[in-house]
Amino acid sequence: MRPTIKDLDDGAKMVSQTLIRVNKIMKKEKQCYLGIDVSKSWFDLSMISVIDNEKQAMISVRFNNDEQGIKQLNKWLKENEVPFNGNSLLVVENTGVYHRLLWAYCSNKNLPIHIGNAAQIKWSQGITRGKNDLVDSQRLCIYCLRHADDLKATPALDPVLLKLKDLFTARSRLISQCNSINVYLHGLKRANTPDVQQLMESAHKPATEGLKKSLEEVEAQILRIITASEAIKRSYDLLLSVPGIGHVTTIYLICCTNNFAGNVSGKQLASYAGVVPFGHSSGSSIRGRNKVHKMANKELKKLLHMGARSVATHNSEFRNYYERKKAEGKHDLAIINAIRNKMVLRVVAVIKNQRKYVDNYQKAA
């Protein structure tokens, strides 16, 4: 009996499926761990591949830190068969602005990237001697390999949040420049004669007026971004409902947490802000008092401090809390720090529950 066309098609399908199974079995699983040291003009990349649990030799290469360099990086990754999925991880130190091209590239290609704290990475390496760009990339690569199970991928780059961060930074710089001129003129006022002082103030007047105008434009841009983004506007309204959290603190919290991406906890944010007291004791000889750690986001801590001072005076709940603790003999700054901690915990709570803060203390009163 001669085979029909249908029989031939079925046979071809069976052969094709068999070949696919064989290829899957023969194809070796590959994980890639990449460390990149970024500078202004270029970045050095080191990579260790693990194929079927066998670690391969480290590869190092350098690319320009520009659009052309990113294209060359993309070509190099494809030539070296780097998987663009969870089997790869790229570690880079937070450099402020220099790593943004890499971050954007990884976000577009779904390549997991961990943007780590430079101090944490350095301390994890133990005692080291000497450094250069190539050595730093190799150390980052080894760090990536050793800690891959614990490292969390950084959320994808959000252009809207990035623009908001840049505008907030510009706002801070403009305010700093205005204050610098005002302090300088105020200092001259004590030593100059009235006519010389008037001359100096006239010379600086165009600069201060220009800075104030630029500041108004920046703040208007910030408000436009907040109102245009539904997610940012939602977080903005929720945070403003917390006592002691004002307009500036709200924007800064959204910027430094990437709009609370990654499900940050209250304890994590409080530790990041430097308002968590840590113990300091060892054996029977060291009995230090609990105190906050100096490693913190100082700008966020300053904003929380001003908010805590305000609610300790004008909010009935915190004012009563402050007076009660003061009567117990607590130090002023210890009480203010406790208020800052309470504010941070409430910030995370309203974001997690997606509900505005309800002042039950006021209702009970």
Image (cartoon, rainbow, N blue to C red):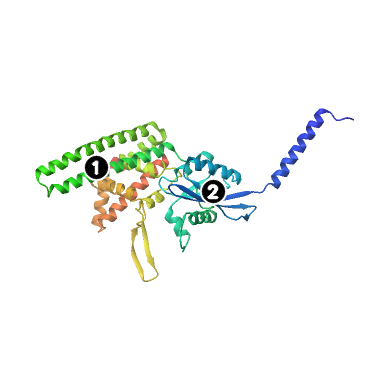
Where residue 128 is drawn, which disc sits there?
A: none
Residue type indicated by callout 2: Leu
Q: Looking at the image, which is closer to me, 329 or 341?
A: 341
Q: Report x, y in % for residue 21.
A: 72, 42
| Residue drawn where x is 14% and y is 41% of the image | 199
Answer above or below: position of 365 versus 290: above
Q: Report x, y in % for residue 331.
A: 26, 57
Image check: 225 left or right of 305?
right
Distance Cα–Cα, label 2 vs label 1: 44 Å
**In the structure shown, which secondary structural element does the residue marked by tag 1 occupy?**
helix
On-image quarter of the N terminus: top right
| Residue drawn where x is 39% and y is 45% of the image | 256
Q: Earlier in the sequence, mark 2 or mark 1?
A: 2
Is there any visible trace of residue 358 in the rendered image? no
According to the image, label 1 marks what residue? 178
On-image quarter of the C terminus: top left
Where residue 89 is drawn, which disc sits there?
A: 2
Residue 86: which quarter of the image?
top right
Q: What residue occupies the far right of the structure in this picture?
A: 1
| Residue drawn where x is 47% and y is 47% of the image | 42
